[in-house]
Image (cartoon, rainbow, N blue to C red):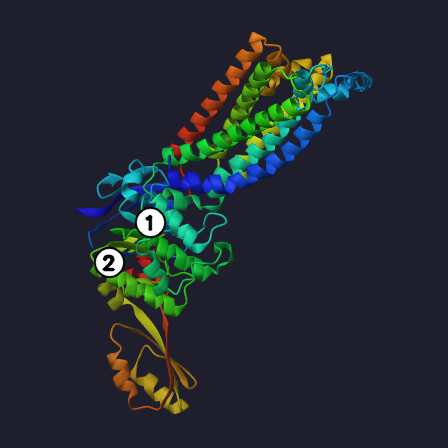
Amino acid sequence: MNVIEVKGLTKDYGRGRGIFGVSFSVGRGETLGFLGPNGAGKTTTLRHLMGFLHPDSGEARILGMDCFRQAAEIQKHLGYLPGEIAFPDGMRGEEFLRFQAGMKGRKDLGRAKELSERFELDLTGRISKMSKGTKQKLGIVCAFLQDPELLLLDEPTSGLDPLMQNRFVELLLEERARGKTILLSSHVFEETERTCGRAAILRKGRLAAVEDMERLRASRSKTFCISFAREEEAARFAGTFPEAVPRGTEVELPLSGSADRLVKALAGYEVRDLSTRSQTLEELFLSYYGEEAAK
Amino acid sequence: MSGTLLKRELKINGKLLALFLAVLTLYGGMITSMFDPKLGESLKAMADSMPDLFSAFGMNQSGATLTEFLSNYLYGFLLVVFPMVFLILLANRLLTRYLDRGSIAFLLATPNRRSKLALTQAFVMVLLLFCLTLYMTGLLLGLSAALFPGELDCGAFLLLNAGLFGLYLFLSGLCFCTACLWSEPRLATGVGAGACIAFVLLQMLSRVGEKFEWLKYATPLTLFDPQGLIGGEPSAVWSFLLLYTGGLALYGVGIAVFCRRDIPA
């Protein structure tokens, strides 16, 4: 049985905003990346799963239960990280976690202490005085508090520095290995790349695709920026790659799939610098489906 | 009800209650100590010189007995308006803040039914208002016994306070209900608080002259009738029972709406 089952979910906020006929499912133990630019409807979909909103039509089910009517029952198995975190007033970190543990019917702080140490989170301070990243860490610890079997995480790494983002990815991989089902929303492909088996791409409130992460990765192209020591070297190199765009001593080269060919070709040149620029989600979508599908 | 939530709300909002009780103690103490059967004459003379102003604040009785004096100078205005500010703030802190900022998500993301959460908040509101009523009743009874032993008609005075609590129940039910209906403070607090303020102004207007007396039918504050209650009039008792019924109904509607509505948190 699928843990999450969404069928034809529609919520129309007018003027093209909302979600329209969104259908997807997440199997037990699966990690699904929920990708889309800002305003695509990721958070709205998650709010339906949380039972905050009534769908205009369609249905959302978790563990076979209706997400609105049986929200309280579903919450026993679920950990949630809101996309825009707002904590209740006037609490300190540990006080908040104790409050949340109490609300979730637990006496102990469970995994909270262990995770706080892992994210180097100081729980003694007032939440109102915490930085954005610290608040994000507190939200993450809270989502994992009761060690739930299902996790709904709305842009979990926003506000975290690269080191903490890495620790978060490690945590997700561990949870995945422990058989947890995870739905992770993000507006950057790279964030879901390492953790998710499949990705659902949302555009303008509609589900554009649900694809294997491997296939998406393979079809994704990167643009390499290569800086050569001399202009004639750059020109000579550009001559061997028809898609390359030379600019003085620099060459821009869009490349999809394996970088093997490029690395081998570069061995014969004096390379001053090599950097890459990744595709945006929109570019990825365009390259995957072509201009037609994007309209 | 959720014990964890109840504990937290009582802890934070109890401080607010203490603040209001301190102010009310000051006023209550001052006014009670001002009672003087002989002074009644001079106060009456003052009231006669500007009858409209005195009656606008519900102070149109001579206040010959201590019971009349207290019902006149405390229960006509002060003990209505101060607790009204308290219950408006309370509805804002118990619901609107959570809904407006989105921190309600942390309450909803727990295995508690919405009805349980709303009922807890409603209970906190009623409990704190009950504590306020109980404290003021006790304080005034104590002060009266200490300063003017035997002067207070305790039975009538208790009935008066029971009626006042009915008024609190009704007004807080209204503010609770509007806070459940909307997330935006402009509407959630605005409509509830606006209605409360309008009720007070209408009552003041209706008391000034015969020309505006009909306005008393436009404000539920009329249903709390201090003079009628200490006089033991059955109609005064019936109207405060109406306040209790209306208040509980408003709480009920608020909870029902909260359970069914979309909460974009």
Depth order, front residue of B179/B223? B223
**Mark 2 burial class by Cα count in 10 Å: few <14, some 14-19, many 20+:** some
Residue furthest to the top: B234
Residue furthest to the left: A1
In-image side of A237 versus B257 (left or right): left
Pointers 2 and 1 within a single chain: yes
Image quadrant assignment for residue B199: top right
Q: Which mark is residue B194?
A: none
Element type at mark 2 = strand
Residue A283 visible in the snapshot: no
In-image side of B224 versus A191 (left or right): right
Q: Which mark is residue A206?
A: 1
Depth order, front residue of B44/B191? B44
**At x 48% / y 61%, what residue is drawn?**
A131
Image mark 2: chain: A
The image position of residue A84, as x and y in percent, is 43, 52
Image mark 1: chain: A
Quarter of the image that includes the N terminus of chain B: top left
**At x 31% / y 57%, what residue is drawn?**
A292
Q: Which residue is mark 2?
A: A211
The image position of residue A267, as x and y in percent, is 28, 89
Amino acid found under the numbered disc labelled 2: Glu
Amino acid found under the numbered disc labelled 1: Arg
